[in-house]
Amino acid sequence: MKANRSLLSVAIVLALLAILLPTTESCSCLPQHPQTAFCESEYVIVAQVLRRTASKDHPSMDAYKIAIKKEYKMSEEARKLLRHGKLFTSSSGSMCGITLEPNKLYAIAANSEHVGLCDYVRPYSDLSIVEKRGLAGIYRKGCSCRINHCWNHKCNQQLGSCNWTPFAPRGNCEMSYGSCVPAGVVKEDGTPIKCHWRRSPRFGQCMAKIRGS
């Protein structure tokens, strides 16, 4: 009986992915929590798009001139890549290209000057106050923890991690109002044994709204 339920859960997940993710002929990305984007990126910035220009060196790419307004994380390699104040993206949406609006502020977390749908590029005004504070420093405190995708609400809790249910209603609360941080129990080398969601008051309000709907 348990085996049948497991097979059913796998089938449901595969069906959801087939519906929610593009086909192999287009851009395919799994959902990414902003904390994961922060921790795994070479740079995290808030930038204003100044204009779009044609890319002479990359005919199939669009080039955006940007002005960095806030710098939350920046490796030396990333600083070299961004020294000209330009970001590049594919001209084709099927190749993960994105369109940025001039004069608009974007929160960007990436590993290259080439960005696309699989990178964290969000209008700054669309972020919750918790996401803004997370990018400004709170997420950094949880980089020793992992955020694992959970598809069926019954995932086993792994050491040093938090489960995230991106396609469930509570997944939006975890993304917009939660951060995964160490729970105080660590190994001798400082690696956390337990992590948990740091739930802001807004997280509680979000969850209460879900329960009441």
Image (cartoon, rainbow, N blue to C red):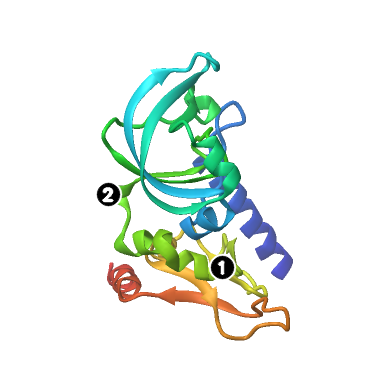
In the rendered structure, the answer to whether residue 132 lies left or right of residue 27 reads left
**In the current view of this chain or complex, which residue is farthest to the bottom?**
185
In the rendered structure, the answer to whether residue 51 lies left or right of residue 29 reads left
Disc on res. 125: 2
Q: Amino acid at mark 1?
A: Asn
* Residue depicted at x 28% and y 67%: 213
Q: Where is 42 relative to 25, above or below?
A: below
Q: Position of residue 139 (x, y in %)?
A: 47, 65
Q: Say which element carries label 2.
A: helix
* Residue depicted at x 55% and y 16%: 57
Asked if residue 169 can be seen in this view, the reply is no
Q: Amino acid at mark 2?
A: Ser
Disc on res. 163: 1
Q: Quadrant of residue 10?
A: bottom right
Give the crowd class for mark 2: few <14, some 14-19, many >=20 residues within 10 Å: few
Q: Where is 36 relative to 17, above or below?
A: below
Q: Disc 1 to disc 2, how far (Cα)?
A: 27 Å
Q: Position of residue 29 (x, y in %)?
A: 56, 42
Give the crowd class for mark 1: few <14, some 14-19, many >=20 residues within 10 Å: many
Asked if residue 21 can be seen in this view, the reply is yes
